[in-house]
Image (cartoon, helix red, strand yellow):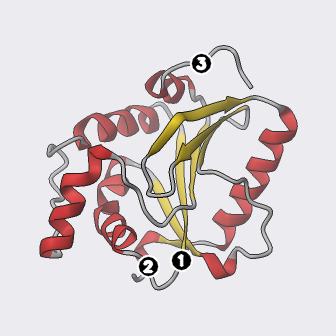
């Protein structure tokens, strides 16, 4: 584990070539999404205004990162039928795409033979992994993350992500 722990914004700003995000949970309970998710559950609609809520900070960081030539890819492994949270996440993904992220979806049943890490993660430039830890209800655990620069771990994570990415369906073609 790395002793030099940057905050996430600094971590993403340190990326020079690639920043990939592997998501494997079917639910989140994190506070910054709660209001929008509850509205979606009540109404079935999403607000795709990139200036609403917490989106400007994230989308600005994505645009800045992609603008430097960094390729940002996000792969989501999901159970089917999908949960309400995944349905909401799929509905708001156009914001990620418009900011420059590439997003793909892989049904969990197609991932059975992939050696996957045990947690959601970010991999920066095939050199540093940021593992995210969540509670059973999808909220941040304490601690909520761990950095890892071990070459064997980085290699395993990179191989897992590439396998998922190659099997996954681009957002535009994945129907929930």
State which tag comes first along the sequence, 1 or 3. 3
Where is residue 49 shown, x and y percent of the image?
15, 53
The residue beneath circle 2 is 82
Residue at 72% in and 38% down: 126
Number of residues whose C-alpha sits closer than 10 Å to that of mark 2, classed few (under 14), some (14–19) or many (20 or more): some
Q: Counting other residues with Cα less than 10 Å from the Cα at mark 1, is it few (<14), some (14-19), or many (20 or more)?
A: some
Q: What's the distance in space between the residues labelled 1 and 3, CA to CA?
A: 33 Å
- Do residues under tags 1 and 2 come within 8 Å of each other at their CB atoms? yes
Q: Is residue 46 visible?
A: no
- The numbered dot on residue 139 is none
Quadrant of the rendered image containing residue 112: bottom right
Q: Secondary structure at mark 3?
A: loop
Looking at the rendered image, the quarter that the N terminus falls into is top right
**143 with respect to 65 (left or right):** right
Q: Is residue 103 visible?
A: yes
> What's the residue at 39%, 39% (across, down)?
62
Give 153 or 27, whichever is nearer the viewer. Answer: 27
Q: Residues within 10 Å of mark 3 (few under 14, many from 20)?
A: few
Q: Secondary structure at mark 1?
A: loop
Give the residue drawn at x 29%, y 69%. Answer: 91
Q: Earlier in the sequence, mark 2 or mark 3?
A: 3
Q: Which mark is residue 5?
A: 3
Q: Can you identify the residue that label 1 sits on?
A: 79
Position in image of residue 141 (x %, y %): 50, 41
């Amino acid at each position: 584990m790395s002793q030099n722990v940057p905050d996430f914004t600094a971590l993403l700003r340190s990326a020079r070539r690639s920043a990939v995000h592997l998501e494997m949970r079917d639910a989140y309970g994190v506070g910054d999404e709660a209001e929008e998710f509850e509205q979606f559950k009540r109404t079935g609609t999403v607000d795709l205004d990139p200036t609403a809520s917490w989106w400007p900070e994230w989308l600005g960081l994505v645009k800045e990162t992609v603008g430097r030539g960094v390729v940002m890819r996000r792969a989501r492994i999901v159970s089917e039928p999908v949960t309400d949270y995944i349905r909401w996440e799929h509905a708001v993904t156009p914001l990620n795409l418009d900011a420059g992220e590439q997003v793909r979806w892989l049904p969990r049943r197609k991932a059975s033979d992939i050696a996957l890490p045990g947690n959601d993660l970010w991999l920066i430039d095939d050199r540093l992994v940021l593992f995210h830890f969540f509670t059973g209800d999808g909220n941040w655990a304490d601690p909520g993350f761990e950095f890892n620069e071990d070459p064997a771990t980085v290699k395993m994570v990179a191989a897992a992500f590439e396998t998922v990415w190659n099997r996954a369906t681009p957002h535009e073609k994945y129907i929930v």
